[in-house]
Amino acid sequence: MARQLTLVPAPPPEDAAGVLGTVWPALRRALDGDAPLAVLPAGPGPADAARAVLRADEPLEPGTDLVVVTSGSTGGGRGVLLSATALRASAAATHDRLGGPGSWLLALPASAVGGLQVLVRTALADREPVVLGRGEPLAAGLARLPAGDRRYLSLVPTQLRRSLAAEPGALAAFDAVLVGGAATDPALLADARAAGVRVRTTYGMSETAGGCVYDGRPLDGVAVRVAEGVELTGPLLAHGYRLDPAGTADAFVDGWFRTRDAGSLSPDGTLTVHGRLDDVVVSGGVNVSPQAVEAALREHPAVVDAVVTGLPDPEWGQRVVAVVVPAAGAVPHLAELRPWVAARLGAAAAPRELSLVDAVPTLHTGKPDRRAVLRTLGGHP
């Protein structure tokens, strides 16, 4: 008989006790192969979208113990099919790379693969999870971790930036701080390391059960190659998409997962990811990486955060548009940001339009919501 999928709504971020009371025991059952699980994002909108993708009334694909709904940052979300074997392989390889099991502080949403993997690693290490509530100081969560144990934390870049500004000492107390889910600016990494933070960059996605390349080097058992885009293989790979055989056949080929990321391998096998293949802005015939422009803008003293996209332009084909969060007391102007970016990346990369916002919109995973940015600018979602 086909197994049916169990849906567990994720508690809101401020409800740490809810994670321990609902998500944690459900995930333990899924890892034991007892009850296949999908965790719905918090909030009626994301949760409803996830339900539509998951279709829990339909039989579950064989070999599936966890279904992770992707954030849909550049399109509709998908249900990624993962086995308990893949999840455990990812967690074990992570602990091997970091120097051994330890206690993890959960500061990511329990519905995203990064947060779920924190819980999987906690289960594999035979520890109890410690959850950081919304608005709770990092130091408070750190204090609840067992004394004398190795202490680990996983963040997205925005969280790293904010925590580094507010609590650098608490960050530096962790044995490792993983940062992933989006590109991390080199300047931010340099500042974190200068403050004594043992930061490790991670690259991966739901289809690889979370991060599988640390500081450009694949975890043990993982292989990387670059064809049209970055391709990954290993025991932590998903086996397809929920109720999407065509999408599965296109993305999972001969044991390899074809990402939509551009990248390159150095002679020693170090991977550098250059951004999404479908995110490139072509302005005046020149390919512009939004991530590179964002990184340049964040180095400006009047800018705290930025998201960059392209909009149709009759003269340039596409024009580079920057959505910027100003630093406290600052009002950045296009006239000062254009030469700043041009000096670092060339004239084609300089934004031709600027919009100021209080905060960059994010998805339930913590990643920038680029579709929401486009809607704000009047472009297509």
Image (cartoon, helix red, strand yellow):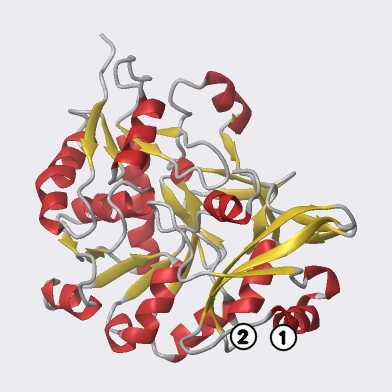
In this rendered view, identify the residue nearer to me: 245 or 123. Answer: 245
User: In this rendering, would 201 be left or right of 46?
Assistant: right
Q: Earlier in the sequence, mark 1 or mark 2?
A: 2
In-front residue for pair 142/43:
43
Question: Callout 2: helix, strand or loop?
Answer: loop
Amino acid on which disc 1 is placed: Glu
The residue indicated by pointer 2 is 300
The reply to whether residue 6 is in sight is yes
Query: x and y percent of residue 217 in the render?
Result: 55, 62
Residue in the picture at 46% in, 91% down: 194
Observer-nearest of 237 and 116? 116
Q: Is residue 276 above or below residue 68?
A: below
| Quadrant location of the C terminus in the rendered image | top right
Q: Residue at x 49, y 87 (%)?
A: 191
Kind of residue at badge 2: His
Q: Secondary structure at mark 1?
A: helix
The vertical placement of 286 against 258, above or below, is below
Q: Residues within 10 Å of mark 1 (few under 14, many from 20)?
A: few
User: What residue appears at the point 39 percent right and 34 percent down from the top-left corner?
Assistant: 49
* Residue of label 1: 336
Q: Position of residue 218 (x, y in %)?
A: 53, 57
